[in-house]
Amino acid sequence: MIIALFGFILLFITVLQAFMPKFLKPTEAFGVYIPDSHVKDPVVMKLKSRYTTFVFTFGIIIFIGYLWWSLTQNPPEEILVLVSVSTQLTTLIMSIGYYFVMHFRVKKRKESEKWLSGKSEVRVIDVKFQEKLKLIPRVIFIIPMIVTVGLIIYTFMKYDQMPEMIPTHWGPTGEADAFSEKTYFSVIALPLILLVMQGMFLMMSEGMKFSGARLNPSNKKTSLVQQLAFRKYTSLLALFVTIGITLILGYFHLQIIHPEISLSIIMWALPLTFLLLTFVVIGIYAIKVGQSGSRLKVEGDSPLIENKIAVDEDQYWKGGIFYMNKNDPSIMVEKRFGVGWTLNFAHPVSWIVFLIPLLLIFGITLLL
Amino acid sequence: MFIEINSNSDVPIYLQLAHQLMEGMVRGELKPGDSLPSVRAFASDLGMNMHTVNKAYHYLEEKEFIQIVAKSGVIIQPNNIPKATEEKKQKLEAQLRPFVTEGLVHKLSEEELVEMVRKLIQSIEEGYE
């Protein structure tokens, strides 16, 4: 069971990382801006396919090695979990390392071939972008948070009924395997963590309103439609995860108060189903929508204007991964290499947004 | 409505912004009462300092082309913009004078200058596309 689960995750990471260039905008290769006139550059194309081949081969070898080791050696559970996580990290680190090699190669090629000279860098803005942007309304994200607050109040009302030892961790079979003494804090630790996570997804959806849209000057209408769709689907994804964790953690918490509703089949099947479903949804998101909506087909493409290119922002993308631009008030920005969002680390607010939830969740678990 | 800001241009960004918004008003793409993006959202899209957008908005507000309302945001002047007064006309004339002079120094004829203005009006009304 554990092997199947971790094996699936390992395979998922391998495929997602290896085929990453396929999910991205053609104008961004390994974190480097490529003007439209050079997106089909043979060297860049070759580097992309070499990256995919290398990461995929390496990942599959690790995957097979992992399966062979775990199925033949029958390791004890702690070691199995440790090795499983290490293999995932190995695949990730290897792909990131190879990414950097490619990043510097593309950067060098762009500089030596002078792809930007003689082009005018243009910034395109749709004045009505905010009006056209359709995100899940804030209130939909707030409702589950109110439910959580209600759960906390309910917990205090039922405090006397709660067991003397509060479960804080559940094993893969859904059996509680770690406990804390009953205090006013430990009884609400679980809903508190849930509240922090719900808050994170609310901020993620709201943050997209304050994130600058980068439209492609040579393909304005298409990139506008793609950007709007990308934000809508991200918002939907955030809602899906919020509802999922609310159901799971809510159920886990309620069954501490009311052991009679606890069913072992639900206890292990619910998180597992949600985990698998999340992977499927993320897979669909990457394949169907793509980064910045780059995989969405748009009818009636506007013609290419060769002389106009987007503003080259490479200087703000450290290593092509970390965005640092003091002037840009955006907090959330679309990743260059990866599907999803990252933060503008030139603003202290980004660090606060990034660290506070982590510190809160870490703090809550430490205090238990 | 799309706005295009050229970062290699000699024209300051805030003026490019203001001019393009005004062109949008001429074309009717921005109608009286239409809302404009908040300073923050606009600056985010530009990837530029909020100060730049503020400057453009104040430039337009001074001309009474837009209204900056606290809380509800920035809107295109909802009352119809009246035809230029005699005073306003004189001011525009004075602004235009150096350009016409430069054209005359470059040996452009009256017809050529008039034709230039006519073409400009056409391109503003039709937009770039």
Image: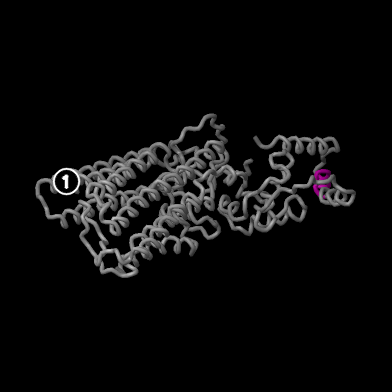
User: In the orientation shown, which residue stands out farthest toward the left?
Assistant: A73
First to last magenta residue range: B98-105
Residue A155 can be seen in this image: yes
What is the three-letter code of the residue carrying label 1? Gly
Q: Is residue B62 magenta-colored?
A: no
Q: Residues within 10 Å of mark 1 (few under 14, many from 20)?
A: few
Residue A59, by quadrant, is: top left
Residue A346 picture location, percent across and down: 49, 61
Task: Tell me the chain of label 1.
Answer: A
Instruction: Please determine whether, in this image, residue A128 is positioned above or below residue B61.
Output: above
Residue A236 picture location, percent across and down: 44, 44
Residue at horizontal 25%, vertical 50%?
Answer: A267
Instruction: Please determine whether, in this image, residue A161 is positioned above or below residue A30.
Output: below
B114 sits left or right of A84 in the view? right
A59 sits left or right of B64 in the view? left
Residue A242 or residue A164, whichever sits in front = A164
Disc 1 element? helix
Q: Is residue B101 magenta-colored?
A: yes
Residue that carries the numbered disc 1 in the rendered image: A65
Q: Which SS type dominates the magenta stretch?
A: helix
Residue at horizontal 33%, vertical 66%?
Answer: A159
Residue B59 picture location, percent across and down: 73, 55
Residue A122 can be seen in this image: no
User: In the orientation shown, which residue stands out farthest toward the top?
Assistant: A300
A151 sits left or right of B112 in the view? left
The colour scheme is: one colour
- Quarter of the image containing the C terminus of chain A? bottom left
Residue A312 or residue B127, whichever sits in front = B127
Residue A175 picture location, percent across and down: 21, 55
- Count every numbered label the image shows and give the total: 1
Residue at horizontal 83%, vertical 37%?
Answer: B114
